[in-house]
Amino acid sequence: MPVHPRLSELHSTHTAWRRDLHAHPEMLYDTVRTAGFVADKLREFGCDEVVTGVGRVGVVGVIHGQSRVSDRVVGLRADMDALPINEDTGAAHASLNPGVMHACGHDGHTTMLLAAAQVLAETRNFDGSAVLIFQPAEEGGGGGKAMCDDGLMERFGIQEVYGMHNMPTLPVGSFAIRPGPFFASADEWIIEVTGRGGHAAMPHLTIDPTVVASHLTLALQTIASRTVDPMLPVVVSVTSFRTASDAFNVIPPSVELRGTVRALSAEAREIALRRVTEIATHTAATFGATATCREYKLGYPVTTNHPLETQHALTAARAIAGNEQVNANAPAVLGAEDFAFMLNERPGAYILTGNGDTANLHHPAYDFDDAAIPHGASFWIELIEQRLPLGS
């Protein structure tokens, strides 16, 4: 099945939805208007259940098929939140909320799943139940975990779960996926280096924490190059270097380093966690200073696609786009995705769909391509009808 004919008929309506969501972006768990928009649409479609407030402001819609003999339940997830970025698209539907924009296409993700829900509620050409998950706070707030902690999988009987993200540079109408680790874990740390401050003209009377922190910045790079197996991708980045003084003639008493660790395996993640602290402690001691890992915040885990469910997603994608437009062995991504929490709860898969030649994700000039809506929504419909076939 190529693009579903009903989606072609409704494309202008779905485009209007997407642009409305784009003009009214909301961040993290403040997605009150967006969640209300979603819930209202699901009720209009005639969903059998519409539940709000899951994981604080998440919305879940349930559509039963023509038959429920199989008692099979498949979950589909879209994220709803925006980013703290000033928009620079010049679009007529640009953000009306200063400093907030949909720079990652979550407005498109929400629209694609709503469009699929509309058609699924009309046709019900499946046996079992489709659970539509609209999640807040993907951008750093762990909304996927919040919904799981609120009993998402158990409350709605979800047996397998799927997610989708748009990707600039991939042609509209194409898809990309891979089995196993797909998106990286993302952890953050803060290290405080303490020495002895003093006058810059008398460095021998100080223990200069800027020198120590500089050596530490370089030493941390050996985690990837000399500690972790080169076949296990990991990135350790120092992203902030803050001193306690802005004066030109003052050696400060302390320096704060902030950074992140990205990994595609639990093994590499664990090694990096341990080595950040060890390297900080011993490097500082070499200079007579101290270094304390004041905070090591475990963030999103590795997003790992389950092999069988990856094949299910591939089958649906090929039915929509054809073999040539589906990459079954896409490169892994060192960005993070909190759909990982849902994949840790239930078997499933995460797939990318093309957004064409647009600005990159998280860029002020990015905009979701409305031409992608029927392709992504058709994938969702095809997946439900294949995973929950009538007469099964």
Image (cartoon, rainbow, N blue to C red):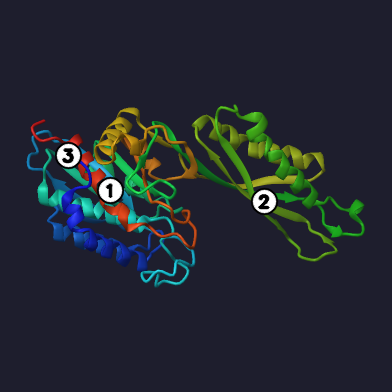
Quadrant of image for the C terminus = top left
Depth check, mark 3 against mark 2: the one in front is: 3
- The numbered disc on residue 375 is 1
Q: Position of residue 67 (x, y in %)?
A: 7, 39
Q: Amino acid at mark 2?
A: Leu
Q: Position of residue 364 (x, y in %)?
A: 49, 62
Q: Nearer the viewer, mark 3 or mark 1?
A: 1
Tell me the number on the disc at residue 385.
Answer: 3
- Which disc number belongs to residue 39? none
Is residue 161 or residue 213 the one in the foreground? 161
Read off the residue under disc 2.
257
For the residues labelled 3 and 1, the Cα–Cα distance comes to 15 Å
Q: Is residue 135 visible?
A: no
Q: Is residue 233 left or right of residue 279?
A: left
**Amino acid type at mark 1:** His
Mark 3 or mark 2: which comes first in sequence? 2
Mark 3 burial class by Cα count in 10 Å: few <14, some 14-19, many 20+:
many
Is 61 situated above or below 126? Answer: below
- Residue 267's place in the image compared with 373, above or below, is above
Q: Secondary structure at mark 1?
A: helix
| Residue 108, x across and y down, in percent | 33, 56
